[in-house]
């Protein structure tokens, strides 16, 4: 029998240990012993529940028990966690309630995180070789639904739409409009910022992320368009030659119909509203003098109250809007009188109203009529008569808007008007066209009882006894017009007739309603007039009259029943007693 040698491996393991393997095992054991020793040393150094030097938002919790650490956090960070939070969105600072943002500080969970961080082996050992203190991020709870709601409101409040750079035209002047970068709060990104930044203990507001939208048209392009087009365009009038007549169009008129629009590639391109320019009284009046416009057929009511043709229409000539635009735009960048003068061709124009089209347009009967009486005066007879002459025969097609100022034109001597009394700043004074408000009031009432839609109107500042309360209108060139839209579905023809003491306006067309009634309410908020003296050269004496508010209902009747009601409210200031001396 063979005896076992002392060098044989034990039979139970069946494994032979070599020299190098034994040395490696010894080294590994030493490493584990060393790591464990360092960890144990670190724990001995830490002492309590929270490792020394452990901080949360600058609050030192080192060496404290969990209960002590929680109390310290509530004491030191609690006020900051509950205080209104200053939030910076771009350049604006807003304050928000943390609770409304869904934010809350979980002190218990924060202490547990601090304790775990302090007992982490790598943190414990690292503390032995580092002088820095571990800073633990607080545990913050966020109610995302509440946060999104509050951030959405904040985004709406602080957001800014991008604005493209442009050039504005106004009253004969051009100026660059600076582009603006759009600002929008990044709500998703702000959720992370709130979690990471709460409670906020810094002096500066908490910066929330934003998204920026840069305008396509920048300052460089607006400066170019201003220099190369806008300023030259308004540097002088352009002169249009129409049928041998020279018609100057000044910068103030041009600026009302010019625009610069983005061409889709970030470049501003000029555009002219030629249709609006043709309708502008400053050009429309001279054009009527230069070329014979088509003459519309004249209508009358026969004995049976039906519409018939009194005089047939005649063709004329007119300026085409496309031709006008093609001539005017190139002139705007010209320098010198010759380079800013162009000839505009005319085309034949047929009348819209003739014996063959009257029935097609639905002009069959009297729709409404109204008469205003006035005291006889030479200036009233002239001005009221001239305005009626210019209005008589107006044709308003369905969905068109009729304008008093566009039809009558400026009340100047050249247009056939003389000086008369007007109301300015609550007092009578003399000016060209005085008395024309009698025609405006008559048109307003004819419009009222025709049931068509008022677009623009305004009453006199104080009440004038010859007009119906709350159913009167005045006009002022350049500031107040009388306009209505023909929403009757059929064309309207306006007859105007004036004498020495009255003016009558009649609308012919097709009635949309059986009847239009006016219901006037009582005077309210009555205010007594004052007494004033005036020695100015334009002073006109006037008698006193109280000021008041009044409401008038326009009642639409169809089939004997009210189908609609509109209320028009008017406020009259007191008419002060004025003596001149």
Image: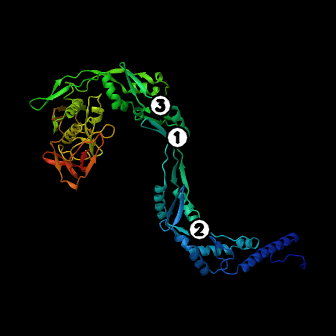
For residue 477, side relative to residue 93 (left or right): left
For residue 165, side relative to residue 391 (left or right): right
Whichever of callouts 3 and 1 sits on the residue coming sooner in the sequence is: 1
Query: Does the rendering let one see residue 44?
Result: yes
The residue under label 2 is 201
Rounded to the nearest whole Å, what is the CA distance between mark 2 and mark 1?
42 Å
Instruction: Specify the quadrant of the image occupied by residue 110.
Output: bottom right
Q: Position of residue 297 (x, y in %)?
A: 21, 25
For numbered disc 1, what is the local secondary structure? loop
Q: Position of residue 356 (x, y in %)?
A: 20, 24
Q: Residues within 10 Å of mark 2 (few under 14, many from 20)?
A: some
Asked whether disc 2 touches disc 1, contact meaning CB atoms under 8 Å apart, the reply is: no
The residue under label 3 is 235
Instruction: Specify the quadrant of the image occupied by residue 452.
Output: top left
Whichever of callouts 2 and 1 sits on the residue coming sooner in the sequence is: 2
Query: Does the rendering let one see residue 401?
Result: no
Whichever of callouts 2 and 3 sits on the residue coming sooner in the sequence is: 2
The residue under label 1 is 217
Q: Residues within 10 Å of mark 1 (few under 14, many from 20)?
A: many
From what the image shows, is residue 226 above or below residue 186? above
């Amino acid at each position: 029998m063979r005896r076992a040698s002392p060098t044989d491996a034990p039979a139970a393991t069946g494994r032979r240990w070599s020299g190098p393997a034994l040395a490696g095992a010894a080294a590994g054991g030493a490493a584990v012993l060393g790591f464990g020793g360092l960890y144990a040393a670190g724990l001995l150094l830490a002492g309590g529940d929270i490792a020394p030097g452990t901080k949360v938002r600058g609050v030192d919790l080192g060496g404290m028990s969990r209960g002590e650490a929680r109390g310290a956090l509530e004491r030191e960070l609690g006020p900051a966690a509950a205080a209104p939070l200053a939030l910076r969105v771009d350049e604006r600072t807003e304050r928000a309630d943390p609770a409304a943002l869904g934010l809350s500080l979980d002190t218990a969970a924060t202490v547990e995180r601090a304790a775990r961080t302090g007992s982490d082996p790598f943190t414990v050992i690292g503390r032995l070789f580092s002088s820095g203190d571990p800073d633990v991020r607080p545990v913050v709870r966020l109610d995302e639904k509440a946060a999104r709601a509050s951030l959405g409101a904040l985004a709406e409040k602080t957001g800014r739409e991008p604005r493209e750079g442009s050039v504005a035209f106004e009253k004969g002047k051009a100026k660059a409009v600076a582009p603006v970068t759009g600002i929008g709060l990044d709500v998703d990104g702000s959720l992370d910022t709130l979690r990471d930044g709460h409670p906020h203990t810094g002096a500066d507001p908490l910066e929330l992320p934003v998204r920026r939208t840069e305008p396509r048209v920048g300052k460089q392009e607006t400066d170019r368009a201003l220099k190369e087009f806008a300023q030259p365009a308004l540097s002088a009038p352009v002169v249009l030659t129409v049928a041998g007549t020279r018609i100057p169009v000044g910068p103030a008129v041009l600026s009302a119909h010019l625009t610069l629009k983005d061409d889709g590639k970030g470049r501003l391109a000029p555009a002219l509203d030629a249709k609006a320019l043709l309708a502008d009284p400053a050009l429309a009046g001279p054009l009527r003098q230069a070329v014979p416009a088509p003459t519309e057929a004249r209508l009358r009511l026969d004995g049976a109250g039906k519409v018939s043709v009194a005089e047939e229409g005649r063709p004329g000539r007119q300026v085409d809007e496309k031709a006008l635009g093609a001539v005017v735009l190139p002139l705007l960048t010209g320098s010198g009188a010759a380079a800013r003068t162009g000839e505009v061709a005319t085309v034949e124009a047929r009348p819209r109203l003739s014996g063959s089209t009257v029935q097609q347009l639905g002009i069959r009967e009297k729709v409404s009529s109204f008469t205003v009486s006035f005291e006889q005066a030479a200036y009233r007879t002239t001005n009221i008569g001239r305005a009626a002459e210019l209005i008589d025969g107006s044709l308003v097609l369905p969905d068109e808007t009729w304008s008093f100022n566009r039809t009558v034109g400026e009340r100047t001597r050249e247009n056939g008007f003389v000086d008369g009394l007007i109301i300015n700043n609550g007092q009578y004074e003399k000016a060209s066209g005085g008395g024309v408000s009698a025609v405006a009031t008559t048109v307003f009432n004819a419009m009222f009882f025709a049931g068509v839609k008022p677009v623009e109107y305004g009453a006199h500042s104080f009440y004038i006894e010859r007009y119906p309360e709350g159913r009167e209108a005045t006009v002022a060139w350049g500031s107040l017009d009388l306009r209505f839209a023909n929403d009757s579905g059929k064309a309207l023809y306006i007859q105007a007739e004036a004498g020495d003491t009255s003016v009558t306006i009649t609308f012919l067309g097709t009635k949309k309603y059986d009847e239009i009634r006016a219901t006037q309410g009582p005077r309210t908020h009555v205010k007594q007039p004052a007494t004033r003296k005036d020695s100015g050269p334009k002073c006109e004496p006037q008698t006193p009259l109280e000021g008041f508010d009044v409401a008038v209902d326009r009642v639409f009747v169809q089939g004997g029943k009210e189908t609609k009601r509109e209320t028009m409210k008017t406020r009259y200031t007191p008419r002060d007693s004025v003596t001149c001396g």
